[in-house]
Image (spheres, grey):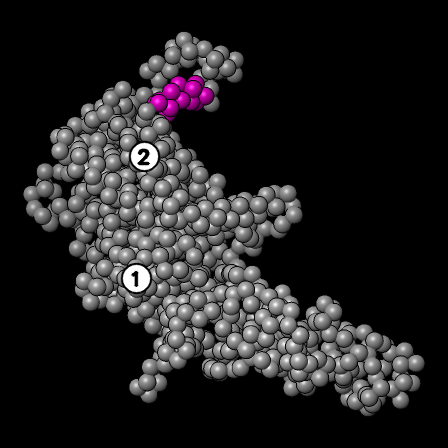
Amino acid sequence: MSFAERPLDEWQSHADNPAEAAEHAAAETVSPTATKTSAAVWGLLPVLSVLHASGLLVISLANVWALSLSSMSNLLFWIGLAIMLVPTAIRLVQQDVSRQERIGLVISLGMALYLVKLVQSPFAFTYGDEFFHLFNTNMILQNQALFTPNSELTISPLFPGLPSLTAAITTLTGLSVFQAGVVVIGVARLLLIVSIFLFAELTSRSHRIAGLTVLFFMCNSNFLYWSAQFAYESLSFPLVIGAFFLIARRERAGRRSTYMAYTLLTLLTVSAIVITHHISSYFMVAFLFGWWTLVRFEVHLNLQPYLSIVNQWRKGKLDTEEMVEALGSREKRTSLTTGTDMAPVATAMPNGEELTEERGPEGIALFSFILALAWLTYVAITTYGYISGVISRAGLSLVDILTGSEQFRQLFASADGYDVPLLERVVTLTGIALSLIGLPFGLQHFWRHYRQSAVAWILATGAVSYFAMLPMRLTTAGWQTGNRASVYFYLGLAFVLALAADKLWTERQRFVGGIINRTMVFGVVFVMIFASGVVAGWNPQNRFAKPVVVDAGGELIEAQGMNAALWMRETLGTNHNVVTDEANGRLMLAYGEQYGYAGRFPFVYDILRTPTFTPKQLGAMQSWDLNYAVVDRRESVWNPMAGYFFDPVNDEGKPTVELTDPLIAQKFDRQPLVSRIMDAGTLVIYDVNELMAVARRAAAGEVLPPALANMLLAGSEVSPAMVNELLESGAISEEKIKAMIADGELDPSQINPALLPEGVDLNEVNLDDVKLDEMNSAGIDLNHIEPKVLEAAQ
């Protein structure tokens, strides 16, 4: 069946609704008056572009105010977004808008939203994943070679598309890596917007639906910040959509030379995707094979009679017995579905271009599969273990929740304990609910007008799959996987929501007796869905600029983590093995060029956040051939999106960051074989080379001198004198003491009872050296102590 014989075009008249068809035709036809002048063709684009710039200016002010801890910054942020979004959304949903204006509007809005991330970090990369790719790019520039090992994200050097392109631009233009990276991701964002528009236009035969698809795609939770960062997925996903467009456009190639040109461009794009990002290439392969299967075997066409029978049963046109009979009998099924619920045939695009037979990706699907498999097998074989581990942990976590062995992950709470405000929680849930409500309207529109398009079927399936992926966000191990995978399914949801908007707008739906018209309804619904994505993707703490470098009397001072990384590279050199937390590990990698064992490695947290050394810890440190330990007392450094900046302060100018107990922070100071070589306040660098040398001698079976053996064992236990000293100075919390006693790490009988927190069993305390007046002054209730214990104290 040729493509021209399939009911795809919503601007064509419907047999059952000619009025609706006439309005669709009007929606896609630019009036003769509108084409007389360029001003009419571009419509309100100049005005709305100014609004985009104005909204960006307001968001820039919000970032400036956030640096001064102003409470107005969040309000300004949302006002700026509203200025950019609302007028553009209302304009794109209207009918009498030219194709040129729609393309211009989505480009202007999309690039303005890209700049939202840039005004947040205008001078350097500050996102956790950006440090990985900054390191990879620097290594290509320094070594003039690919695949330099990356200790933090080990598979990233195996996909050198982004760092290679950035390094090439840096070399050719003299731009810094940061500047070149901003250009690369900016061009990728432009490619993404244009590719989605053109691909959706080819699928829907409507530039109006194409514009709405781009508009709704901007609502996904990763669009505003995550997909704008310097990371390989930010480049690969636009290339994937570009490849889809090239394949779809290839079907309309009238001449063989044009067909071959599109084929060559597609093969080059597919090759670039495979060497840029693993998940994007696997998504591309799955999409292309699904597309090819539907076209080759006409699976979607063969299913339609069955679905039509079920639809008639749902509408009450058939009883259950007739439905069952029809599903089992081809003749009965044919008689009931012939001429049923079928739209008239479209023979051309609105611009007069003839439709051709749908051929799909043909050999390109096989080429992409072979190339991705070859790269995985011969270059990036470790990717298999990386991805399978992530997926298996996510799946097992979901199973544990379903079986009741694991609790649901708390929504709207970040790893550092920050709780999202109630209003933003309501907005998020409302946006998801509105998307879910729009889904059946969009699917109905798809069924009536696009059910014979293989691509439309895949996109509709992706829309449903998006909601099937949402439960992953409730799992501890799978929420991040679900969040990152959502962008691939959101493409389908954006298309279906665009169909829903087109359907509801065209049918002139009105609410509240016509008082609230469809323009107002669409504007409110879109803003709610967009805001829902922003809140779900980025908590308020990370939306605004934070100080990385400050000007102190004309001297620029970096935040202590970056300062320590730069000091280590300049003073100690590069390529040392370092143990540290998540945030400092990425800084040490990108700016210090050290090989870091950071928070995600086994034993790292125990080494840095327990008060004693254990044989397992020392064994891990030996296996890493460790040279230095970077110990940061701030708890925020375990959050990969924080810990890179100067600490926030309260109204009194005091830091509000939570610090770990001194008992833990001084762990390396208590080990005589460890040397403190750099102190930056809450961050200290220790030299552990001597400790590792002695530990290796002991592990090899050498009998150490008693003095050296004692030094090796120092720090393996918490002494009572140490705890008493910390209690007297108030440097250790009572909660920590209670926890140590409960875990058996501390014997309460060796601690001064006058310093012990409430709730400790004093009958187990040694009172030989304690006087009763000390106990009275400490507020200890003597009535709860056995008489024989009091006699011993007297």
Q: Residue at x 27, y 23 (%)?
A: 6
Amino acid type at image mark 2? Ala
Q: Is residue 752 rendered to the left or right of residue 135?
A: right
Above or below residue 582? Residue 458 is above
Residue 788 percent location from the top left of the image: 92, 81
Q: Is residue 585 rendered to the left or right of residue 551?
A: right
Q: Is residue 676 magenta?
A: no
Which of the numbered marks, if any, corresponds to residue 320? Answer: none
Q: Is residue 157 rendered to the left or right of residue 256?
A: right
Q: Residue at x 69, y 75 (%)?
A: 717
Residue 57 percent location from the top left of the image: 27, 66
Residue 774 percent location from the top left of the image: 79, 89
Q: Please, what secondary structure does the residue beneath circle 1 have?
A: helix
Label 1, on which residue? 140
Q: Residue at x 38, y 15 (%)?
A: 337
The magenta region covers: 297-312
Give the quadrant of the C terminus: bottom right
Label 2, on which residue? 365
Marks 1, 2: nearer the viewer: 1
Q: Please, what secondary structure does the residue beneath circle 2 have?
A: helix
Above or below residue 280? Residue 346 is above
